[in-house]
Image (tube, coloured by chain):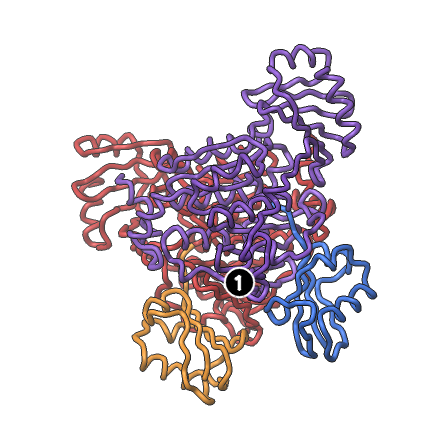
Chain colours: A purple, B red, C orange, D blue
Amino acid sequence: MPKLDRYNRQMLFKGIGEAGQRKLLAKQVLIVGCGALGSSAAEILARAGVGKLTIIDRDYVEWTNLQRQHLFTEEDARNQIPKAVAASDHLTKINSDTEIIPVVIDATAENLESYVQQADIVIDATDNFDIRFILNDLCQKNKTIWIFGACVGSSGMTFTIIPQKTPCLDCLLKVTPMFGATCDAVGVIGPAVQMVVAHQTTEAIKLLTGADDDVSSKLMIFDLWHHHYQTIDVSKAKQSQCSSCGVSPEYPNLAYQNQTKTEILCGRDTVQIRGKKFSFSDLQQKLSSFQNVQENAFLLSADIHDKRIVFFQDGRTFIHGTHSIEEAKKLYYQIVG
Amino acid sequence: MPKLDRYNRQMLFKGIGEAGQRKLLAKQVLIVGCGALGSSAAEILARAGVGKLTIIDRDYVEWTNLQRQHLFTEEDARNQIPKAVAASDHLTKINSDTEIIPVVIDATAENLESYVQQADIVIDATDNFDIRFILNDLCQKNKTIWIFGACVGSSGMTFTIIPQKTPCLDCLLKVTPMFGATCDAVGVIGPAVQMVVAHQTTEAIKLLTGADDDVSSKLMIFDLWHHHYQTIDVSKAKQSQCSSCGVSPEYPNLAYQNQTKTEILCGRDTVQIRGKKFSFSDLQQKLSSFQNVQENAFLLSADIHDKRIVFFQDGRTFIHGTHSIEEAKKLYYQIVG
Amino acid sequence: MIKVLLFAQLQEEAQTDVIEIDFQEGTVTELKKILQSQFDFSQLSESMFAINEAYALEHDVVKSGDTVAVIPPVSGG
Amino acid sequence: MIKVLLFAQLQEEAQTDVIEIDFQEGTVTELKKILQSQFDFSQLSESMFAINEAYALEHDVVKSGDTVAVIPPVSGG
């Protein structure tokens, strides 16, 4: 069938029309993170016919993801497929017109910038504030709109951050939180994810189709279990002296770049080590005496007593079963020598 | 991994916990309709670990569905797989613990009742008021809770109808609408679908896990494009003389059963004829002189000049490309003789 | 002044999602007549009305400052 | 009386999602002190406050009848 016909029900919607659909097909969206928010946002935008989606994620599909992370199947968890790759495989079957670029990296201030520069808009589907503040600076620096989103329990929130217009994340959170509630610590229900994504993708579709005047200027927060829904006017939060979006920006999250080579993945009972790249064949020899060695094109894993070690091709290693950096490093060096 | 572990993030949520998860795994939900609302509700509930989902739908996957109907792929549209079957195939890959029963029938007052009786709750994912009023009567008669949902454009609404407690659909719509706005006539955007489903499935999960006190008693209506969100107290609408939920119910939509053998599928440019069951091999002979004959295990279709005819195994036939019952019947009898 | 929120197909018929009307006090029936006289609505008689997020009957009173939601039958799914 | 809506982890810490407080008039800073004295909140200083759906600064005034939303940092995704 002709390319446009499949979007008929979306073109019938007055806010988009055929002209809006043609714009969508020519646009590029960067989705940072491909967990619950990212996989669902990617699905909605691919079905809607966005021209190109770049999906960045550092992690692989696990069984506990399946309860709320759309696109992924039991086979993806069984084979430990990186989330960006698994999402790309499923999305291609849903809409072969949309170009999907899966990127399996640990996003940093450095490697993220070129992706931000290429994107028409950025969807925040990350799970920690470190990367959100980096994204905030990068988007202000490059004058790119990004759509903040987060959820936990039965609650969630979203806000569209428009450079030179709305407050930025730094303005809103004057005190940088040490941590925020995570799904891994306090749980989350699937519908809360979908509610955040419904708002993020609506605003994205408005921006991509040129319906800028209809974009919400408010921060939306809800609780589905207890029936709260608020849309908050945050214009007052904008600070002219903000170090990220103010008159003399310094982009602190890019300048004082976090050099940590090792970090605890919040609430995951996992430590990530950024190290040298090893060949998988070398590693396989070293792991040969351990249990449950699994390999696919993207990662190699094994059980080391009560812990599990996972090597990625980009030089990162996950040690599952500990939140002690010391213990994780000890185990890591036992293997790589 | 042990059966419960994959639901860890949902059990961590205080409103559900391990006790709630065990209840979910033992529950049965009937989803009537497997278009946009139905496919997404089924995905969320299967991922959440509902024990058994029965999915009823009379239609097959078409290209224009893919823009907003989750689960389905281009291959499903290419092969014209019945929606209930396609959904079942995908859901089984997502959660093999959930039993999925796909039912390819045109739901009527008669064939629907036994499914309603078996279900713990019913999700409305239909696309017309005829079937919703039948569902309303069946659920009142059998004291089954059903969750009304509908969407169009960037708007949608939902309301949980609890027998002997809330108003029913008849109470709310005192004048039975001749028609309601359909996605096929005025379009719909994907996020509006997800917003309705997020609310329907949250209420479903509350009911299934025993969190009845947290169930919303309000009718929710929204418009994502124009940022409206209202939760309406409809308790005043309940009528003691209602013919469906009142003191002397008559269930008019079951009693005066719609005997139409032929109907126009609203906004679809399609006529449905309920006729005799023919063997597919007989039909194939009759269709041999026509273009583009396609067959799968569930249906047989062909182009007849500028129209397309689709035979289902249960004796129904769709004539696409007309909304004239007369013209459709003429074509039908030309083929079946 | 009252604020009238229109949903779904009513928006297309009125070409807007919010109408402000100079309405001091009157019943829902009276408001319906005014709306029907100003716009070419096809399904106003089949629509639900809510005043300040409470379902309203024909004789219920709308006062200046109220927000009225008008909800037409929506059958898409 | 004011109504305080709590979101996400604050609900678990207070064991409720809505608190009614006998509060006549005072700043957000004063309200925070009262909340912190009554409940064992871990992230109140990092939370956003909104009065009647408008972002509030420390010196903004909360009056009887207002609805205050308290929004802690949420990082799940």
Would residue C16 be found to the left or right of residue B14 on screen?
A: left
Nearest the camera: B50 or B334?
B50
Q: Where is residue B99 in the image (x, y as percent from the top left)?
A: 57, 38
**Dividing the image into 4 quarters, which one contains the C terminus of chain C?**
bottom left
Q: According to the image, label 1 marks what residue? A: A218
Residue lying at 69% horizontally and 55% vertically, measured from the top left: A175
- Badge 1 marks a residue whose secondary structure is strand
Would residue A206 be found to the left or right of residue D74 on screen?
A: left
Residue A68 can be seen in this image: no
Residue A336 position (above or below residue B193):
above
Label 1 resides on the chain identified as A
Q: Where is residue A54 in the image (x, y as percent from the top left)?
A: 46, 37
Residue A307 can be seen in this image: yes
Q: Position of residue B309 (x, y in %)?
A: 25, 42
Nearest the camera: B50 or B141?
B50
Nearest the camera: A288 or B329?
A288
Q: Position of residue B285 (x, y in %)?
A: 22, 30
Location of residue B179 (image quadrant):
bottom left
Residue lying at 65% horizontally and 14% vertically, measured from the top left: A283
**Dividing the image into 4 quarters, which one contains the N terminus of chain C?**
bottom left
Neighbor class of circle 1 (other Cα within 10 Å; few <14, some 14-19, many 20+) is many
Q: Which amino acid does label 1 sit on?
A: Lys
Residue A262 position (above or below residue B54):
above
Residue lying at 70% horizontally and 49% vertically, measured from the top left: B13
Location of residue D70 (image quadrant):
bottom right
Residue lying at 22% horizontally and 40% vertically, measured from the top left: B336
Residue lying farthest right? D37
